[in-house]
């Protein structure tokens, strides 16, 4: 139900909510959104609703405390103490659940916890830094923290990016149409591309990594890179599309990362709201790149280890963060200048190494990870190709998804569609893409063996 | 106001309109084409029935009485459905539904694989091919491709006319036997005491062998190291119900896609290995499965009179899978395997069970040999090959 691609959400919750939201007089729409969001969360994980509400209330309580001593005599000290208190609470909550998840039971992590806590942290720091001149009302704050399009997996919108006072919110037929088109683009990206490529990745898993040929290992890495991108980008488009339909601005979370000219740039264009969160609330407070080379490198290391840990508790995620740290540090120190002179080299480097980093991300078992890397780089002498023509089989089976995926990674393609989104051909494409996606979702759901055919 | 809507949000409007139309079709079909589908109005919209139907090959217009389709992919369950409707004298627009269906069935049964029509058997067939259709969704995209790799490379041509006549006669005979009592052509053991025993053979043994099967056999083709010697007619999600109608091979020279029926009539083999049955576990009963299985074996023997036929026990799944899965578990597999084993006469048909080689002490697929609990990892197909080499029959 909490998945945007479930039939329950697409045909039950969302249409009903949208109708209620539009029928509701403008000044009650925040109430409608708040209640709708809590209902949405309750349909996913009812037992964690109290935790969510407590976190919302406590954070508002502290925000008001921080705000209230902004102009007192010992303002700075007072604000700092209170900020530290609430950060200990928020970060502690996240760390505690993550630790329990890693060491005891991974399923215990509350739905969307890290996303709503990150919103709360940014909210507190923004108040502390006086970036918000006024303290929003409780209701607006609660809507910001809990709004259902963003609570499960982001984007991590900042408070000032949203239009939380209803007066500023623009609800119109044009917005409805625009948001719906974003939503369908995301749905198609997820259901028609990501879910298909996921099967290729699974097929390779079934063979056993030790036996795949090196070309197939690279094809797998490329396919996984696309799958992950389309999955998350598709989700983000759906989330932001819903926000636009509700009258909020579009929050960009991906900016065609695979067209980047360096890995640092890739990470400015991938999961942008998380990247900017770490930049604004970790990297820059630590001193950023302004305090000498040694400190810069240290700060990068901290940021990337945190990023790794945030994505998962396994050792492979730490390794993943470390590899990215090494690559990005190398770019900062030397490679970056070369890439500026020869952008083609930078693109090549990015397209070559990003898939390798995703292998660290995808394969959680370290032994398996070693095998896969051994097949990617055969000089390591790990494993043995059992069928040297295996790549042709999988290319034959998946070439159309891979080709479509590669095209969909090109920025000009989606920009073109976006520019001409009112053209009748694009409108018809939108409708067809929607029903095709629904077809794929239904046939997978009604036939649970779709993934399991023998 | 509606004009304003269409002008300002055409995509939204088109979506809503097409959604309404699909909902109407789904709602209407709920009482006919889609009436057997699981459906919960709280969780799913009516239009999802249309999608599900499309995925299973049940198009709404087919239900509307378009009987004269001449469509050779006409799913069996639609036939059954039309038949039911015909019997009840409903809007099928056909005075003699039965005859029309016989004709349809006949057209389809050029393979000789069609079941004798009968109420209960039909229901089973309905399940069977409905299922095949479902799992065919992705097979269209992937399985077919895979099968291109599995071309029977040495297919000879030019014998078609001859066998069609012969098989026509054979088919008649076969039908008589089937219509007769029991299975006189499947003695448990040879009357004259003439039977054969398994012995170790070398890889040359596979030079005139053909392997027929589902994804497990596809794996044997890819990683067993005998693809140069033997021909493989294998495809992901292949079932006993569609083994003769799926295009499993490419014709030598022309590159035309051909069915197993065609391939087996173009080239004679010394041994035929058959492993099918796991995809069918959720379908019908062991009886309906075996009815089809027996027919397949009979047909293979008609086409390949000199071949040794190895019916292989279905490879099991791991203990974890066995415990969790209500359908794909070892209890169901063992039941089918016991029935398959009874087909062996130890003269021309032999039962072999690779589970002896790949299972652990508890009788489940060894968890070390697999990642997805169903398929062997590539490097363990060697075990299967060695098992086959230890179980040769030489007559």
Image (cartoon, coloured by chain):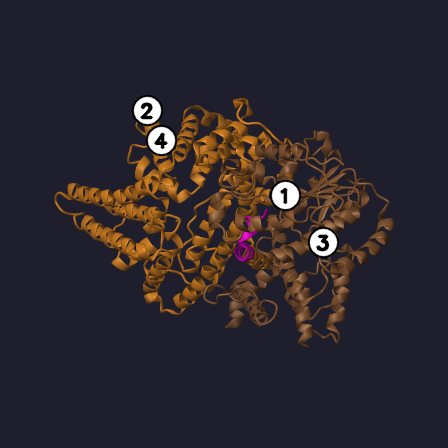
Chain colours: A orange, B brown
Q: Find residue A294 and name its label.
A: 2
Q: Nearer the viewer, mark 1 or mark 4?
A: 1
Per the model, the C-alpha gap separating discs 1 and 4 is 41 Å
Q: Is residue A450 magenta?
A: yes
Q: Nearer the viewer, mark 2 or mark 1?
A: 1
Per the model, the C-alpha gap separating discs 3 and 4 is 68 Å
Sequence-first disc among 2 and 1: 2
Disc 2 on helix, strand or loop? helix
Do the numbered discs 1 and 4 sit on residues whose CB atoms are within 8 Å?
no
Q: In this image, A337 relative to A89: left or right?
A: right
Discs 2, 1: same chain: yes
Per the image, the residue denoted by label 3 is B295
Per the image, the residue denoted by label 4 is A300
Q: In this image, B327 relative to B302: left or right?
A: left
Sequence-first disc among 4 and 2: 2
Q: Nearer the viewer, mark 2 or mark 3?
A: 3
Disc 3 on helix, strand or loop? helix
Q: As displayed, is residue A289 above or below residue B12?
A: above
Please rate how many residues cluster around mark 3, counting C-alpha atoms within 10 Å: few if below 14, some from 14 to 19, many from 20: many
Per the model, the C-alpha gap separating discs 2 and 1 is 49 Å
Please rate how many residues cluster around mark 1, counting C-alpha atoms within 10 Å: few if below 14, some from 14 to 19, many from 20: many
**Which of the chains bears the disc numbered 4?**
A
Per the model, the C-alpha gap separating discs 2 and 3 is 77 Å
Q: Which residues are magenta?
A: A441-454
Disc 4 on helix, strand or loop? helix
Per the image, the residue denoted by label 1 is A397
**Which of the chains bears the disc numbered 1?**
A
Q: Quadrant of the N terminus of chain A?
A: bottom left
**Which of the chains bears the disc numbered 2?**
A
């Amino acid at each position: 139900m909490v998945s945007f691609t479930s039939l329950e959400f697409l045909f039950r919750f969302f249409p009903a909510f949208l109708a209620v939201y539009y029928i509701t007089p403008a000044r009650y729409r925040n109430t409608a959104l708040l209640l709708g969001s809590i209902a949405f969360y309750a349909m996913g994980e009812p037992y964690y609703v109290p935790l969510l509400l407590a976190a919302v209330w406590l954070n508002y309580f502290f925000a008001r405390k921080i705000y209230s001593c902004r102009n007192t005599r010992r303002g700075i000290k007072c604000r700092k103490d209170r900020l530290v208190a609430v950060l200990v609470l928020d970060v502690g909550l996240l760390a505690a659940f993550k630790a329990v998840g890693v060491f005891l039971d991974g399923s215990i992590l509350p739905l969307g916890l890290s996303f709503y806590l990150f919103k709360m942290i940014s909210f507190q720091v923004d108040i502390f830094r006086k970036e918000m001149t006024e303290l929003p009302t409780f209701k607006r704050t609660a809507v910001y923290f809990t709004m259902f399009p963003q609570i499960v997996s982001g984007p991590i919108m900042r408070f000032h990016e949203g239009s939380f006072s209803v007066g500023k919110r623009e609800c119109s037929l044009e917005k409805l149409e625009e948001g719906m088109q974003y939503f369908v683009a995301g749905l198609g990206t997820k259901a028609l591309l990501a879910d298909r490529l996921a099967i290729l990745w699974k097929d390779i898993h079934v063979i056993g990594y030790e036996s795949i040929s090196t070309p197939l290992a690279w094809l797998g890495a490329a396919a996984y890179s696309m799958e992950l991108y389309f999955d998350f980008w598709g989700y983000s488009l759906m989330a932001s599309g819903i926000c636009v339909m509700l009258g909020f601005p579009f929050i960009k979370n991906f900016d065609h990362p695979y067209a980047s000219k360096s890995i640092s740039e890739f990470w400015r264009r991938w999961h942008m709201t998380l990247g900017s969160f770490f930049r604004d609330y970790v990297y820059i407070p630590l001193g950023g790149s302004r305090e000498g080379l040694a400190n810069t490198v240290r700060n990068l290391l901290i940021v990337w280890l945190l990023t790794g840990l945030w994505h998962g508790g396994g050792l492979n995620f730490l390794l993943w963060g470390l590899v990215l740290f090494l690559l990005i540090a190398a770019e900062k120190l030397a490679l970056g200048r070369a890439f500026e002179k020869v952008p083609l080299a930078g693109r090549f480097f990015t397209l070559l190494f990003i898939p390798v980093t995703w292998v660290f991300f995808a394969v959680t078992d370290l032994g398996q990870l070693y095998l896969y890397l051994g097949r990617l780089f055969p000089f390591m002498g790990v494993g043995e190709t059992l069928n040297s023509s295996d790549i042709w089989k999988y290319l034959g089976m998946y070439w159309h998804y891979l080709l479509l995926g590669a095209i969909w990674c090109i920025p000009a393609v989606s920009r073109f569609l976006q520019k001409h989104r009112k053209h009748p051909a694009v409108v018809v494409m939108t409708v067809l893409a929607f029903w095709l996606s629904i077809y794929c979702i239904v046939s997978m759901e009604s036939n649970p063996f779709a993934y399991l055919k023998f | 106001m509606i004009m304003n809507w269409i002008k300002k949000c055409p995509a939204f409007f088109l979506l809503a309109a097409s959604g309404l139309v699909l909902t109407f079709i789904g709602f209407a079909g709920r009482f006919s084409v889609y009436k057997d589908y699981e459906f919960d109005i709280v969780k799913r919209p009516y239009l999802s029935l249309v999608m599900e139907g499309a995925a299973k090959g049940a198009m709404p217009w087919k239900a509307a009485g378009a009987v004269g389709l001449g469509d050779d992919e006409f799913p069996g369950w639609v036939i059954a459905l039309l038949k039911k409707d015909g019997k009840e004298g409903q809007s099928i627009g056909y005075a003699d539904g039965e005859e029309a269906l016989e004709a349809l069935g006949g057209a389809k049964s050029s393979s000789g694989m069609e079941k004798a029509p009968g109420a209960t058997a039909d229901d089973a067939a309905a399940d069977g091919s409905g299922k095949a259709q479902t799992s065919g969704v992705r097979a269209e995209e992937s399985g077919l491709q895979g099968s291109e790799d599995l071309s029977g490379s040495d297919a000879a041509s030019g014998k078609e006319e001859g066998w069609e006549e012969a098989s026509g006669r054979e088919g008649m005979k076969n039908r008589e036997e089937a219509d007769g009592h029991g299975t006189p052509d499947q003695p448990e053991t040879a009357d004259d005491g003439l039977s054969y025993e398994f012995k170790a053979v070398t890889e040359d043994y596979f030079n005139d062998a053909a392997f027929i099967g589902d994804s497990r056999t596809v794996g044997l083709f890819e990683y067993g190291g005998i693809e140069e010697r033997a021909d493989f007619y294998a495809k992901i999600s292949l079932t006993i119900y569609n083994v003769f109608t799926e295009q499993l091979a490419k014709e030598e020279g022309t590159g035309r896609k051909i069915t197993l029926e065609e391939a087996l009539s173009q080239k004679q083999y010394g041994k035929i290995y058959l492993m099918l049955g796991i995809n069918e576990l959720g379908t019908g009963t062991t009886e309906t499965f075996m009815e089809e299985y027996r027919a397949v074996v009979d047909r293979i023997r008609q086409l390949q009179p000199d071949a040794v036929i190895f019916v292989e026990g279905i490879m099991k799944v791991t203990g974890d899978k066995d415990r969790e899965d209500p359908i794909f578990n070892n209890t169901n597999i063992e039941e089918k395997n016991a029935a398959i084993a009874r087909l062996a006469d130890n003269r021309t048909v032999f039962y072999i069970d690779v589970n002896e080689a790949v299972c652990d002490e508890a009788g489940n697929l060894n968890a070390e040999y697999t990642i997805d609990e169903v398929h062997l990892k590539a490097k363990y197909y060697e075990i299967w090959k060695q098992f086959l080499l230890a179980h040769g029959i030489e007559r």
